[in-house]
Image (cartoon, helix red, strand yellow):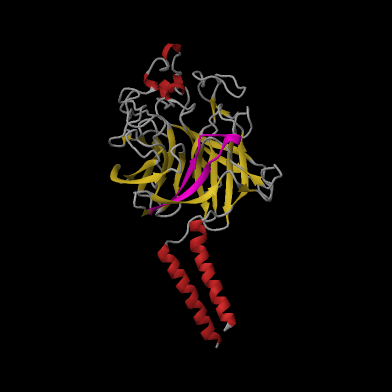
Amino acid sequence: MKNFNRLSLTAFACAVGVGFSGGLVASAQTLIARAILPSATFLPGPVSGQFITGANGLTVPFSSQPVQGFSAVLDNGDGSFLVMQDNGYGAKGNSADALLRSYNIRPDFKTANGGSGGITIDSYITLSDPDRKINFPIVADSVNYPNGANNIAVDASIRNGRLLTGSDFDTESVRRVSDGTLWFGDEFGPYLLHTDATGKVLDAPIALLGVFSDSNPTIPAGTGNLPNSKGFEGMALNTAGTKLYALLEGPLKTETNKQKLIISEFDLALKAYTGKQLNYKLDSAANAIGDMTAISDHEYMVVERDNNQGAASRFKKIFVVNFNDVDADGFISKRLLADLLNINDPNNISGNGTGKFDFPFVTIEDLVLLDPYTIGVLNDNNYPFSSGRAPGVADNNEFIKLRFVNPVTVPEPGTWAMLIAGSVSGIFLARRRKK
C-alpha cells in the first residue's frame, strides 16, 4: 500500500505540475543558441539615410540599403527564416529613401555543440506597387523626396519599379497564409497590406474602421485618434490559418486607461474585420509591445518592453495570453513566460563567462515558436541609432533561442482534471493487474 500511495502522489504531482507550474510562474529560460548579423550589413539599392543624422560614430548617407530593423520573423521550416524590415529610420519624415524589404536569413547558431554564430542572407524581396493598388500617393509618385527643402530627386529605381519606402508604410508585422501570399501590419494607417510572395501589392490597403494614426496619409498630419508609431506592431495568424489578430502598440488618444491595447480580428476569406476585439493590458502605461505570435488555437506570445536600453533596461518580458480567459474588466489573461533580462547561460554561449545573459535592447520585436519547449527571439537594432549591447556601438541584429523546462503552452483547467484522473486511474489499473 505504501508503494501505491507513493506512486499515486507522484502521478498526481506530475499531472498538477504540467498544468500549474507553467501557468502560475515563469519557466526557467536558458540560452541554447545565438547568431549575429553584423550591424554594418548592406545590400544593393538606392542611397539611403539622406534625411537622418549619423549616430554611434557612423556617418550618413549610406551608399546602399542597410539590412536592419527586424520587426517580424517567420520560420521557413528548412533552417531558414523570413525576417521583415520595418520602415527604416524610425519615422515617416526620415525614411523616404529606405526600401521596405524582407529577407530569407540562414543562421548558423552557436550552441554548446559548436556553430559559427553567424547569419547569411539567402535572398530578399522588396515591396512594390506596379499595379497601382495603393489608393493614395506614395514616394514613387513624386519627383523629389517629400522632405522639405532638400529637393533630392527620388531614385529612378524607386520611381520605375514603384518600390515602397518607409515614408509610405511602417511595416511592423508579417504573416504568410496558406496560398503563399503575405499580409503585413502597418503603423501609419494603421493598415493591413496584402502582397504576393514577391512583395507585389495585391489589394488596396485595408484600414481599421474608426482608427486613424497621426501619420495616416488620408487625414491632415497629427489629427488622428492614435499617436504616431502606435499602429499594428504585432499581428498573429491563428493556428487554423483563417484569422489575423492585429495588436495596436499604443492606446487610442480617447482611451482613459492608457494600459489598454486593442486586438482586432480579421477574416482572411472575407478580407474584412469581423468586429470582434480583445483587450491586452500593459504592465505599465509607459511600456509598449513588440510582437505577438500564436502558440495554440487560443494562446499567443506577446513581448512587452520598456523604452530603455543597455544598463537602463528594467522590463523586457514575454507573456502568454489566453483569448478564452477574459477578466471582469475585459482584459485577456497573461502569464509570464520569460524575463529577457535574466536568462540562464550555463554553456557560456554568450561568451561572457557569468552564467547569465540578457537581451537589453530598446526594441525587441520578433518572436517565433520553434517547438513546444523552444522559442526564437530577435531584436530590432534601429540602425544606426540603438546601442543597447555596448554604449556608443551600433547594435547588431541578434537571434537567440531560449529553452524552457516546461512547455510554452499549458493545458486548460478542464484538461488538468482529465490528466489527474487519467493518471490516478492508470495507477489503479496497474495495481489491479499486478495483483
The quarter of the image holding the N terminus is bottom right
Residue 75 seen by the camera? no
Q: Position of residue 110 (x, y in %)?
A: 65, 45
> Which residue occupies 28% across, 45% down?
274
Above or below, comparing residue 398 to residue 386 in the picture: below
Whether residue 306 is in magenta: the answer is yes
> Which residue occupies 49% across, 18% down?
51
Q: Position of residue 238 (x, y in %)?
A: 39, 50
> Which residue occupies 35% across, 24% down?
222
Q: Quadrant of residue 231?
A: top left
What is the magenta range? 300-324
Q: Taken as a whole, is the magenta stretch helix, strand or loop? A: strand
Above or below, comparing residue 13 to residue 24 in the picture: below
Number of numbered discs:
0
Q: Position of residue 10 (x, y in %)?
A: 56, 72
Residue 422 seen by the camera? yes
Whether residue 109 is in magenta: the answer is no
Q: Position of residue 127 (x, y in %)?
A: 43, 31
Q: Nearer the viewer, residue 256 or 120?
A: 256
Above or below, comparing residue 13 to residue 340 in the picture: below
Q: Quadrant of residue 147?
A: top left
Q: Quadrant of residue 219?
A: top left
Extreme residue in the front direction = 256
The quarter of the image holding the C terminus is bottom right
Q: Nearer the viewer, residue 14 or 84?
A: 14
Extreme residue in the bottom direction = 435
> Which residue occupies 43% across, 70% down?
418
Q: Is residue 169 left or right of residue 383?
A: left
